[in-house]
Image (cartoon, helix red, strand yellow):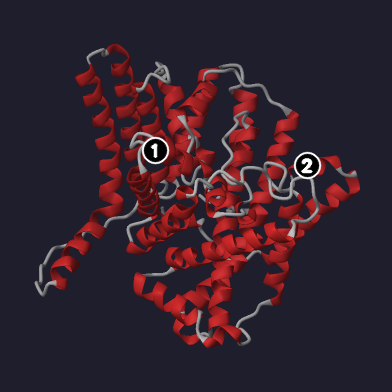
């Protein structure tokens, strides 16, 4: 079920009441309730895929216990690779089987050879990329002795399947989330109110910003041959705010709901479109995935400790793998490759850690240099998003070629004023609130009537501009 669905607005209060009023005296009962609620939440899409998440959980729970007892290096490594192969095997089959088959056939066709290989009608399980990486973090950390394996099956099942962040993150580390299932949780009114505030902001991002931008981004991308360069640029702009509003909105809702139940999840977005270079962008965009690849792929490969060749190799590996993680299409691989090209000059010049503070910290407006840097970074990100959104590589290149034609300087054929105003208002609020964890986090410090007026305005805008219920983009990944 979707966070923005009627079913979820019925589901959440029921779980909340059972959690705090029925099972609060027994930690195991609370964790068991989370497991049941999470399986109901996940099974709402297709109950058949529950077997995958249950099997993956049991495998990694068992391997964790075996790693605790095993001291032989070879056997410990064998257990680790068993977990990796099982989890990535499921992910590879459901997500990439047909991609590799089609690529295999196309490679022979390129040399004039026709090969007949049957593909399978495979349904991608929702959230498999997210919970696979989450459970892998547990096994790897236990193997590296950074985490003590758990003996409590309910705690582990709850960690893997925790419904607020199950299908689209944030990708939680076992070292952060799992210990929270061991501790008795008390209801905290201030945390709950803050959680509801973050949920409200996340819903606004999704329903008002993302879904309205999606309407016109889809029209423009699906008919890109018919539009001028200025309209294509506008389409890329709409998609940039569609994916940001959609994905960061989901993360805000997940983090906010978790606070209602006494859990603290990691921050996943930190106002990435205010970044001054692409390295800063990647420290602020999908933080849980970026840091996962850094800790479990980039550093084990040698990170930046080796020579120039190793630095370049490792940079391209993590960006291309990150692109491939997003989907079985060459457009995602090129998107990752392009971001690696953006990142490379900063890394080689040792300037990839220059902008680590908040832009224009303590100031109302950025200076000219910062504004220029933000604009350039957003623009090159926009170009990369074209590959992310395009149906295929050919469309992406044609889209960019046509976008930079002389028609770029003509008036757009599509220019929905109301969306432009909504996005501009959204940017202003995000800019004002950029010092917080999310844009309206610190609104409780302002005059109460003004605070409640803003809440009411966000709710009215959601009812006014809510369109047809749309799935979150990252459900397909």
Which residue was labeled with disc 1? 303
Residue 231 % position (x, y): 57, 80
Relative to residue 236, is residue 140 drawn left or right? left
Tell me the distance, in whole angstroms, between the alpha carbons under discs 2 and 1: 37 Å
Which of labels 2 and 1 is toward the front?
Answer: 1
Q: In this picture, is 309 found above or below 409?
A: above
Residue 257 % position (x, y): 62, 39
Which of the two residues, 326 or 34, is positioned nearer the viewer here?
326
Q: In this picture, is 191 found above or below 386?
A: above
Helix, strand or loop status at disc 1: loop
Instruction: Rate crowding at label 2 as few (under 14), some (14 to 19) or many (20 or more) other CA atoms within 10 Å.
Output: few
Tell me where residue 193 sits by quadrant. top right
Q: Looking at the image, can residue 41 be seen?
A: no
Q: Looking at the image, can residue 415 be seen?
A: yes
Residue 458 % position (x, y): 75, 56
Which residue was labeled with disc 2? 442
């Amino acid at each position: 079920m979707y966070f923005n669905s009627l079913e979820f607005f019925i589901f959440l209060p029921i779980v909340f009441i059972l959690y705090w009023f029925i099972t609060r005296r027994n930690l195991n009962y609370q964790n068991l309730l989370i497991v049941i609620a999470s399986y109901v939440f996940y099974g709402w899409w297709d109950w058949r895929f529950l077997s995958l998440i249950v099997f993956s959980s049991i495998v990694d729970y068992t391997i964790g216990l075996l790693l605790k007892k095993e001291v032989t290096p070879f056997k410990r490594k064998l257990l680790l690779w068993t977990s990796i192969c099982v989890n990535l095997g499921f992910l590879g089959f459901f997500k990439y089987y047909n991609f590799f088959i089609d690529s295999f056939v196309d490679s022979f066709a390129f040399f004039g050879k026709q090969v007949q290989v049957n593909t399978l009608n495979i349904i991608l399980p929702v959230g498999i990329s997210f919970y696979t990486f989450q459970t892998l973090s547990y096994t790897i950390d236990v193997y590296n002795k950074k985490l003590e394996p758990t003996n409590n099956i309910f705690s582990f099942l709850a960690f893997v399947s925790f419904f607020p962040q199950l299908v689209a993150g944030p990708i939680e580390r076992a070292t952060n989330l799992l210990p929270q299932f061991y501790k008795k949780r008390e209801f905290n009114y201030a945390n709950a109110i803050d959680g509801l505030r973050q949920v409200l902001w996340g819903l606004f991002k999704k329903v008002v910003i993302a879904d309205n931008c999606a309407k016109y981004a889809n029209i423009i991308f699906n008919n890109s041959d018919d539009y001028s360069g200025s309209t294509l640029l506008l389409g890329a702009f709409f998609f940039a705010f569609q994916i940001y509003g959609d994905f960061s909105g989901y993360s805000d809702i997940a983090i906010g709901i978790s606070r209602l139940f006494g859990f603290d999840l990691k921050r996943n977005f930190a106002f990435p479109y205010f970044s001054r270079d692409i390295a800063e962008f990647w420290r602020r965009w999908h933080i849980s995935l970026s840091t996962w690849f850094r800790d479990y792929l980039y550093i084990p490969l040698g990170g930046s400790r080796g020579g120039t060749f190793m630095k370049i190799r490792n940079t391209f590996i993590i960006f291309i793998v990150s692109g491939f993680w997003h989907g079985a299409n060459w457009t995602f691989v090129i998107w990752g490759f392009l971001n690696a090209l953006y990142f490379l000059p900063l890394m080689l010049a040792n300037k990839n850690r220059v902008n680590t503070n908040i832009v224009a910290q303590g100031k109302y407006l950025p200076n000219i240099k910062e504004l220029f840097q933000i604009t350039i970074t957003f623009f090159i990100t926009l170009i990369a998003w074209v590959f992310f959104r395009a149906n295929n590589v050919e469309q992406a290149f044609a889209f960019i070629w046509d976008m930079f034609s002389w028609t770029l300087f003509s008036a757009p054929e599509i220019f929905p004023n109301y969306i432009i105003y909504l996005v501009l208002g959204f940017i202003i609020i995000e800019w004002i609130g950029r010092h917080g964890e999310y844009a309206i986090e610190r609104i409780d410090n302002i005059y109460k009537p003004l605070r409640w007026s803003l809440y009411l305005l966000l709710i009215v805008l959601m009812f006014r501009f809510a369109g047809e219920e749309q799935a979150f983009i990252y459900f397909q990944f």
